[in-house]
């Protein structure tokens, strides 16, 4: 057997956790360390230094930031590899630049702190990473006490939803965990039926038929994913964001899995309304998977 016949060793998974060096980053760094430990992944710990200031101030900020960043890395549990990185620039630009340069498998951020006037116009770092990036993003809100035990994946049966679910599996987030796949749908034609004063039994029959069709479509969608284990599936009629929040309150998952749509141009400037609403109001961690980069 020649050297060319040997299979190439699998590349070590690479995670990127961004920190602003404050205690607000502790939960994200703790979850990143748990994931890196479980998979043997390399963890890159990134802090961005604002470069919109005089060079002397940039240099001074870098000198002050480096020991703090190194201390945060040293405080993490032992990892296969942990690498602190200082990068100049706006945080979202630095995150995306390093993510691409290092070909990371997962970005990990803490829940954003809103600065109302600024965020109205340009959005939080998290939102900007999602709008412009193409790599899975884990938004950490809860203390990272243990591996994820229950995932709730909200799907619209699109290729984007399938990509999100496959990413959760590929990243090892579903290992040893319960997975519930929820499809929320709005029954078509209800407004027209109400205006036409259709009899209630006919309306009920229409709702039942729509629910059966949605359930069959969800089963077909799940079958096509080739998941290692069959998840629980739920089909619920109603406004998607409302249904997902209600079921999240009912099931209390520790991770919500979402895909975002593949809008481009001006539409890409704003997160999809369902994803944006859920990210703003979710109380658990969320894995959000944007579309793949154009070929």
Image: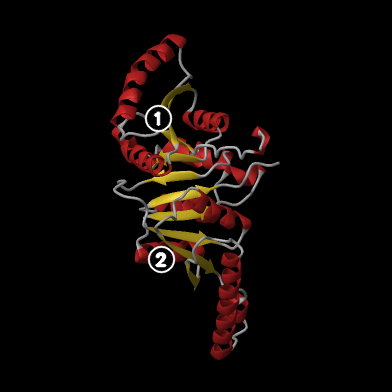
The mark lying in front, picked from 2 and 1, is 1
Image quadrant where residue 221 sits = bottom right
Query: Where does the C terminus fall, quadrant-wise?
Result: top right
The residue lying toward the viewer, choosing from 37 and 20, is: 37
Query: Pointer 1: residues within 10 angstroms few (<14), some, or many (20+)?
Result: many
In the rendered image, which residue does mark 2 sit on?
247
Residue 162 appears left or right of 233 = right
Image coordinates for residue 59, horizontal then vertical, percent:
42, 12
Q: Residue at x 36, y 19 (%)?
A: 66
Q: Which disc, if any, is residue 82?
A: 1
Asked whether residue 14 appears in the rendered view, the answer is: yes
**Vertical comparison of 217 with 166: above or below:** below
Q: Secondary structure at mark 1?
A: strand
The N terminus is located in which quarter? top right
Q: Locate residue 209, reporting x and y percent.
A: 59, 82
In the orientation shown, which residue stands out farthest toward the right? 295
Q: Which circle's residue, 2 or 1, is located before the other in the chain?
A: 1
The residue shown at (50%, 32%) is: 95
**Rendered residue at 55%/82% (across/down):** 208
Residue 136 % position (x, y): 52, 44
Q: Is residue 51 above or below residue 250?
A: above
Q: Residues within 10 Å of mark 2 (few under 14, many from 20)?
A: some
Q: Which residue: 59% across, 75% down?
A: 216
Query: Horizontal placement of 230 versus 160: left or right?
Result: left
């Amino acid at each position: 057997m020649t050297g060319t016949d040997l299979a190439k060793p699998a590349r070590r998974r690479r995670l990127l956790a961004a920190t602003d060096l404050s205690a607000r980053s502790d939960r994200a760094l703790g979850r990143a360390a748990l994931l890196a430990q479980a998979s043997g992944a390399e963890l890159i710990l990134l802090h961005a230094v604002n470069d919109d200031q005089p060079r002397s101030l940039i240099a001074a900020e870098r000198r002050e930031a480096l020991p703090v960043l190194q201390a945060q890395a040293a405080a993490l549990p032992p990892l296969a590899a942990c690498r602190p990185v200082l990068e100049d620039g706006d945080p979202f630009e630095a995150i995306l630049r390093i993510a691409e340069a290092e070909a990371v498998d997962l970005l990990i951020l803490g829940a954003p702190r809103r600065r109302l006037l600024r965020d109205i116009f340009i959005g939080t770092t998290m939102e900007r990473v999602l709008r412009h990036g193409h790599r899975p993003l884990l938004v950490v809100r809860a203390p990272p006490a243990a591996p994820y035990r229950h995932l709730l994946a909200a799907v619209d049966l699109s290729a984007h939803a399938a990509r999100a679910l496959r990413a959760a599996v590929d990243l090892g987030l579903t290992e040893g965990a319960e997975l519930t796949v929820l499809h929320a749908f709005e029954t078509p034609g209800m407004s027209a039926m109400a205006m036409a004063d259709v009899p209630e039994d006919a309306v009920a029959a229409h709702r039942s038929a729509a629910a059966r069709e949605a359930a069959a479509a969800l089963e077909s969608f799940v079958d096509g994913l080739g998941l290692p284990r069959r998840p629980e599936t739920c089909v619920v009629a109603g406004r998607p964001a409302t249904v997902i929040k209600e079921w999240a309150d009912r099931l209390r998952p520790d991770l919500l899995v979402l895909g975002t749509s593949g809008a481009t141009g001006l539409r890409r400037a704003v997160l999809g309304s369902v994803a944006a609403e859920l990210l703003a109001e979710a109380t658990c961690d969320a894995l959000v998977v944007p579309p793949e980069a154009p070929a």
